[in-house]
Image: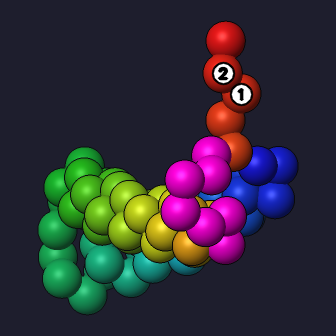
Amino acid sequence: MLQRGLACVAAAVMICAICMALLPFVVLILGFSSPVAITVITLIAAVLLNSLRRHIRAMTRHRLGPGKTHSVHR
């Protein structure tokens, strides 16, 4: 579980860093205002993070096998 969390955090940091690096280029090249460009980049980052989260969960479920869970039951 810790490894999955660290993978998600590392991916989130990388996606956010790439998006922040692309922000000036989007504003300059496409001519969007800064708030519009930030909104578009935020939506793109959300889509990328959601698909990555689903992929990591599927890999974890596949590794654990059917019927096994990684959560603690209370």
> Measured from the top left, where is residue 12 in percent x and y?
60, 60
Report the number of discs.
Answer: 2
The answer to whether residue 19 is above or below residue 29 is above
Describe the colour scheme in one phrase: rainbow
Q: Tell me the quadrant of the picture where the C terminus can be found.
A: top right
Could you give the CA–CA distance between mark 2 and mark 1, rounded to whole angstroms? 4 Å
Q: Position of residue 5 (x, y in %)?
A: 72, 51
Q: Is residue 74 left or right of residue 1?
A: left
The verdict on residue 65 being magenta is: yes
Q: Residue furthest bottom?
A: 29
Res 13 visible: no
Q: Residue drawn at (42%, 63%), measured in percent from left and top?
A: 54
Residue that numbered label 1 is attached to: 72
| Foreground residue among 65 and 23 | 65
Q: Residue at x 66, y 21 (%)?
A: 73
- In the rendered structure, are the residues bearing label 2 and label 1 in contact, judged by CB atoms less than 8 Å apart? yes
Would you say the magenta stretch is mainly helix, strand or loop? loop
Q: Secondary structure at mark 1?
A: loop
Q: Amino acid at mark 1?
A: Val
* Quarter holding residue 14: bottom right
Query: For residue 73, which numbered disc appears in the image?
Result: 2
Q: Which residues are magenta?
A: 63-69
Looking at the image, the residue that sits furthest to the right is 2
Q: Residues within 10 Å of mark 2 (few under 14, many from 20)?
A: few
Disc 2 secondary structure class: loop
